[in-house]
Amino acid sequence: MKAYVKTYIKHFNYCEQDYIPSEISGSPAVDIHHIKYGRYKRDDSIENLIALTREEHNLAHEKKLSEEYLQKIHLDFLDKLKQG
């Protein structure tokens, strides 16, 4: 398992076998995506990682889901979890 996936799973107290919802749709996530992906260095912080379905992940790579949109969705998701 890649280190950034472990970071995501650990942050949310998931186990590898747990259901992990897409932060966009709530459907089963199959990919942890870097919201911003640097050319020479990746930011593997939880603020830069979002759980997505395969279709959503493809749309993100096709730039049909913007970094700004993904960042807003993810920050809203983190805020909701903090509030309980």
Image (tube, rainbow, N blue to C red):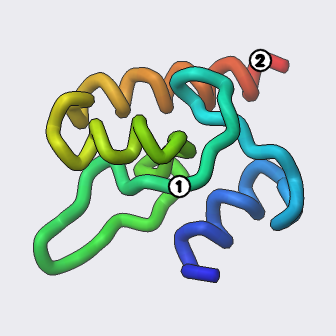
Question: Which residue bears the numbered disc 2?
Answer: 83
First-in-chain label (1 vs 2): 1
Q: Nearer the viewer, mark 1 or mark 2?
A: 1
Q: Residues within 10 Å of mark 2 (few under 14, many from 20)?
A: few
Of residues 73 and 59, which is closer to you in this image?
59
Say which mark, if any, is on residue 73: none
Residue closest to the far left: 39
The x, y position of residue 78, in whole percent, is 61, 31
83 lies left or right of 63: right
How far apart marks 1 and 2 lie (CA) works out to: 25 Å
Q: Image point 66% across, 29% down: which residue? A: 27
Question: Which residue bears the numbered disc 1?
Answer: 31
Q: Image point 87% across, 53% down: which residue? A: 18
Dot 1 and dot 2 residues touching (CB under 8 Å)? no
72 to 21, vertically: above or below: above
Q: Residues within 10 Å of mark 1 (few under 14, many from 20)?
A: some
Residue closest to the far front: 55
75 to 18, vertically: above or below: above
Which secondary structure lies at badge 2?
helix
Which secondary structure lies at badge 1?
strand
The x, y position of residue 30, in whole percent, is 60, 52
Q: Image point 48% across, 51% down: which residue? A: 49
Image quadrant occupied by the C terminus: top right
Amino acid carrying mark 2 in the image:
Gln
Of residues 81 and 67, which is closer to you in this image?
67
Amino acid carrying mark 1 in the image:
Asp
37 to 62, vertically: above or below: below
Of residues 32 and 58, which is closer to you in this image?
58
The x, y position of residue 74, in whole percent, is 49, 31
Of residues 43 and 15, which is closer to you in this image?
15
